[in-house]
Amino acid sequence: MKRECIIQALEPMAQLQAWSHHKPVEGLSNAAVLIPLIERDEWQVLLTKRTAHLNNHAGQVSFPGGRAESTDASPLDTALRETEEEVGIQQHFIKAVGLIEPYLTVTNFKVVPIVGVVNPGFTLNVDEFEVADVFEVPLSVLADQARYQRRKILWQGKNRAYWELTYDGFQIWGATAAMLYAFAGRLAAIQKTEQGFSNF
């Protein structure tokens, strides 16, 4: 898939708003993640597996990212800072190209997902306290919505539905899978539009 098509599927970076650092009325905490698209022969998405002892989302597959700090002016600052802290990819390797819709987690975070194109010349420097593993998945796999399965889990006395897919032994589910599914839907819509134009 061409870079231009990916960017067309996203909300523009100009829509990104600065953090207010005032907790919203609904009690959600601000957070941001980077969806890192690595420019290899085929687009790859970098994901991490969190360590088992963390308070939030322990042991789960996730994007680099996390809670906003008071020094972060915007979600982009949060996503870039957390990416460098967690996996060592420095900011000059990353070009933010767009957004997908915010995601509200069951742990009361409002997460802003930012898609960034990553130059493959980086060297990983993993924070072993937070990150147990780092791996890449072809975008073509994650963009195929047919690969996702709908599951249910009992959470705080309520049945909650979530998306899940498995790749190379990694279980991708919850917030990460939900954001990937939304991203895949955007890419599918653009591809359908492009195919429609090519039929004229």
Image (tube, rainbow, N blue to C red):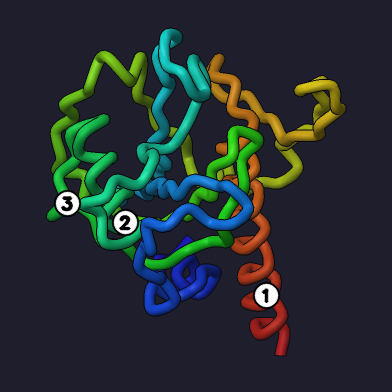
Q: x%, y% of residue 5?
A: 49, 70
For the view shown, which residue lies furthest in the top direction?
53
* Residue 74 in picture, x, y percent from top left: 32, 61
The amino acid on which the numbered mark 1 sits, given as a three-letter code, is: Gln
Q: First in sequence: mark 2 or mark 1? A: 2
Q: Nearer the observer, disc 3 or disc 1? A: 3
Residue 149 found in image quarter: top right
Q: Nearer the viewer, residue 181 or 60?
A: 60
Mark 2 → mark 3, Cα distance in angstroms: 11 Å
Q: Is residue 125 above or below residue 51?
A: below
69 left or right, relative to 151 = left
Residue furthest bottom as drawn: 200
Residue 196, how many percent across, how many down? 72, 80
The amino acid sitting under disc 3 is Gln
Question: Between marks 3 and 1, how big is the CA–CA gap?
Answer: 35 Å
Residue 47 visible here = yes
Gap in angstroms between the C-alphas marked 2 and 1: 24 Å
Crowding near pointer 2: few (<14 within 10 Å), some, many (20+)? many
- Residue at 27 percent across and 40 percent down: it is 83
Q: Are marks 2 and 1 in contact (CB under 8 Å)?
A: no
Q: Which residue is mark 3?
A: 91
Query: On the image, which quarter does residue 159 sit in?
Result: top right
Q: Which mark is residue 117?
A: 2
Q: Residues within 10 Å of mark 1 (few under 14, many from 20)?
A: few
